[in-house]
Image (tube, rainbow, N blue to C red):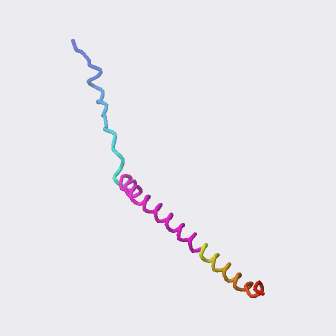
Amino acid sequence: MMQSFSHASQPAASVEPVAPASSSLQTALGCLLLFLPVVICLSVSTHRRHRRAKLRRQVQMLEKLWLLNAPKLLP
């Protein structure tokens, strides 16, 4: 008597481990985590510098206007 084992004739299901994120993705995320704070700090300092320069130009313009009108205001 011959016994047939059905599970023996089927190929075993291969279980593949889930691969971690690729090294290029990890590198990109690492660079992002390193450079994002630097970019934010630089943009904040640049914005503040721009505001100071703009205010300085406005003050200079108002001083020029005041000097132009000063002789007219004095008796």
User: Compared with residue 49, is residue 30 higher up or lower down, i.e. above or below?
Assistant: above
Q: Quarter of the image holding residue 2?
A: top left
Query: For the C terminus, which image quadrant?
Result: bottom right
User: Of residues 17 and 40, which is closer to you in this image?
Assistant: 40
Query: How far from the left and from the top, in percent, is residue 20?
Result: 34, 44
User: Of residues 37 and 69, which is closer to you in this image?
Assistant: 69
**Magenta residues, start to end:** 25-53
Query: For the N terminus, which image quadrant?
Result: top left
Query: How far from the left and from the top, in percent, is residue 61?
Result: 66, 80
41 left or right of 13 in image: right
Residue at x 33%, y 53% (from the top left corner): 23
Is residue 68 a member of the stretch shown in magenta?
Answer: no
Q: Residue furthest top?
A: 1
User: Of residues 60 and 29, which is closer to you in this image?
Assistant: 60
72 left or right of 32 in image: right
Q: Residue furthest left?
A: 1
User: Compared with residue 75, is residue 36 higher up or lower down, i.e. above or below?
Assistant: above
Residue at x 53%, y 67% (from the top left corner): 48
Residue at x 35%, y 50% (from the top left corner): 22
User: Compared with residue 57, is residue 1 higher up or lower down, i.e. above or below?
Assistant: above
User: Compared with residue 57, is residue 36 higher up or lower down, i.e. above or below?
Assistant: above
Q: Quarter of the image holding residue 54?
A: bottom right
